[in-house]
Image (tube, rainbow, N blue to C red):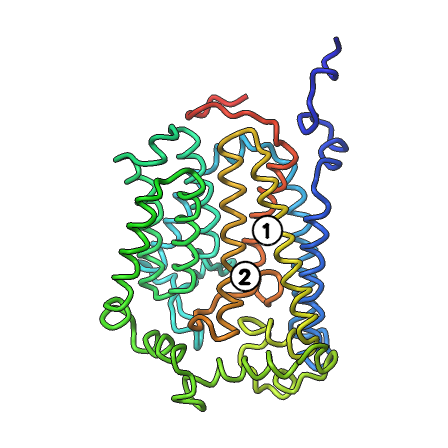
Amino acid sequence: MTSSALTRPGERDRLSSKITELDWRLIGLLCIVAGIGTAMLYSIAGGHWQPWAIKHLIRFAALLVAMVGLALVHPKWWFRTAYPLYGVLLILVLMIEFTPLGYEPAGAGAKNWLNLGFTRIQPAEFMKLGLVLALARWYHSHTAQEARWSWKLIFPAGMIGVPFLLIAKQPDLGSAMVLGLTGAAVMVVAGLSWRIIAAGIAAAVAVIPPFVMFVMHDYQRNRVLTFLNPEADPSGTGYNIIQSKIALGSGGLLGKGYGLGSQSQLEFLPERHTDFIFSTVSEEFGFLGSFFTLACYVGIILIALRIASLAHSHFGRIAAAGMTAFFALFVLINGAMVMGLAPVVGVPMPLLSYGGSSMMTVMIGFGLVLSTRVHRYAELPKGGYGLI
């Protein structure tokens, strides 16, 4: 029997064979969402490519090529770089707090950017990737019982807790919340005991009121109180949510028409190119446009979870599921935020909102997901660097 006969699909080394193993449905849906984002950025700029639409499109095109390239990388390289990458990203987060390189963009309300001279980055965005990879590697090398309940769970809890606290202190509660929930999702996927999950949920519910009243900054506390009653200050702290709801509701079934959204075109809608871009979609394309956009997101999430379930290596399953989790959290939190179902925390709608760091994080994450699909039959040894 020839060696090719013994080779299962996804294990062939030829570039053409790997490319055929890519999930083109997933790639197509990512392109559709990014295309909708480009169209909306063009619309809210008054029918101009500048200042947002053309940059959004060029970034996506470049990152799409990078994503396909990362999809061809064998999972063993993702495995090897998991801990070093986590360590480097944690150092970058620490540099924001303890070096003069960290800075606060005008009006951001948080010192969460790092000026490296040749470039500026937001380490909290990339920390989500590093956390997922590090947790996937840790769980790959431990038993199901240890993942369910063991004193060793202090290590993954620490991996989540340290960057969570550092990012929350910046204070960037949106990124910290996504990071913490992503880490929790990975622990659940890995098999954490349901008793621990229930106890964690109960503890979180008990901690939230004192945290809001005594730990949050005043402007953060106002966001929470505004979420509960935005009409109490309609021209102040409640303005964003109220305008977003108006944009969502005024679109009706079919919308006002492309480029005809009054809330966005007349600039009543705040941050219409970033946090509240989904409200613009609803205003101009109505319920059907919103439904189609959300259906694309659901399709992306379901396909990615299916890819995770087919991976033969434990590392691949957990890493792909973790990457899907943080993408889903972006969609859920932003969607709830613009609908007035959650406080405004500055979480973008992935690939729809304008922003380089967020898009890069998402595309690198899906590069890993597609790598899991291409190399789904790959086996990785338990622990160590002894990889072939």
- In the picture of the structure, the residue carrying the numbered disc 1 is 301
Q: Can you tell which quarter of the image residue 186 is in?
A: top left
Instruction: Give the camera-side residue of 78 and 310.
Output: 310
Q: Position of residue 231 (x, y in %)?
A: 43, 87
| 47 relative to 91 in the view: left or right | right
Q: Quadrant of residue 207?
A: bottom left
Amino acid type indicated by mark 1: Ile
SS for tag 1? helix
Whether the residues at callouts 2 and 1 have beta carbons within 8 Å, the answer is yes
Residue for point 59% across, 67% down:
353
Q: How busy is the neighbourhood of tag 1: few (under 14 within 10 Å), some, or many (20 plus)?
A: some
Label of residue 331 in the image: 2
Residue 198, placed above or below residue 113: above
Residue 179, position as x, y percentages in the image: 41, 54
Q: Is residue 174 above or below residue 264?
A: above
**Quarter of the image containing the C terminus?**
top right
Tally of numbered tags? 2
Q: Residue at x 61, y 56 (%)?
A: 298
Left or right of 156? Residue 28 is right
How far apart marks 2 and 1 lie (CA) works out to 10 Å
Residue 224: percent from left, percent from top: 36, 75
Q: In the figure, is residue 44 to the left or right of 80? A: right
Q: Residue at x 73, y 45 (%)?
A: 24
Precedes in sequence: disc 2 or disc 1: 1
Q: Residue 55 occupies which quadrant of the picture?
A: bottom right
User: Horizontal and vertical percent for residue 32?
Assistant: 71, 59
Residue at disc 2, secondary structure: helix
The amino acid type found where label 2 is placed reads: Val
* In the depicted structure, whether residue 42 falls above or below residue 78: below
